[in-house]
Amino acid sequence: VQLQASGGGLVQAGGSLRLSCAASGNIFAILVMGWYRQAPGKQRELVAADTRGASTNYADSVQGRFTISRDNAKNTLYLQMNSLRPEDTAVYYCNARMVNGINYWGQGTQVTVSS
């Protein structure tokens, strides 16, 4: 599976961004797709995840502000980020977890929120 993330950038606090992650390859074996982020000096953390469109879960810090969604026709995962805060600044990574437990990662996209 190959994952190509895009959509990061610089935005002011309170603004919005939408991240995209295009998946290719053996996509039918993907169980969970999600977004993680890693800020400087911090561990990578789960932001949001989608289990084959059947369920979603979010980090408490983004609940109500971020929305994860899929477009199965385009094999693309999205993360709509609203009401962005400076603490959302991080490199965001797309992740695909396969039914056999193997994880694949996209290349990361930088999100910077200025105060």
Image (tube, rainbow, N blue to C red):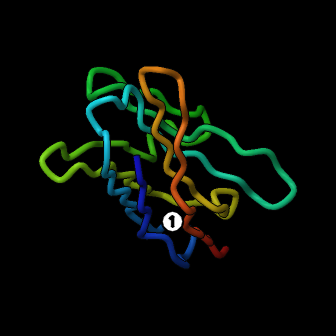
Left/right placement of residue 41 relative to residue 52 reads: right
Residue 41 in which image quadrant: bottom right
Q: How many marks?
A: 1
Which residue, given by chain and number where applicable, does mark 1 sit on? 14
- The residue at 79%/45% (across/down) is 43
Q: Who is closer to the viewer here, 84 or 7?
A: 7
Amino acid on which the number 1 mark rests in the picture: Gly
Q: Is residue 60 above or below residue 69?
A: above
Q: Position of residue 6 (x, y in %)?
A: 42, 68
Residue 108 occupies quadrant: bottom right
Q: Residue at x 42, y 21 (%)?
A: 99
Residue 2 at x, y percent in the picture: 41, 53
Q: Residue at x 31, y 40 (%)?
A: 26
Image spot of residue 1 (x, y percent):
40, 46
Residue at the left extreme, as displayed = 73
Please indicate whether residue 12 sits to the left or right of residue 27 in the image: right
Residue for point 33% across, 51% down: 23
Q: Who is closer to the viewer here, 62 or 98?
A: 98
Q: Position of residue 101 (x, y in %)?
A: 53, 23
Task: Judge from the rendering whether residue 1 lies leftward or rightward of residue 95; answer left or right.
Answer: left
Judge the density around disc 1: few (<14), some (14-19), many (≥20) Cα neighbours within 10 Å. some
Q: Secondary structure at mark 1?
A: loop
Q: In the rendered view of the protein, which quadrant contains the C terminus?
A: bottom right
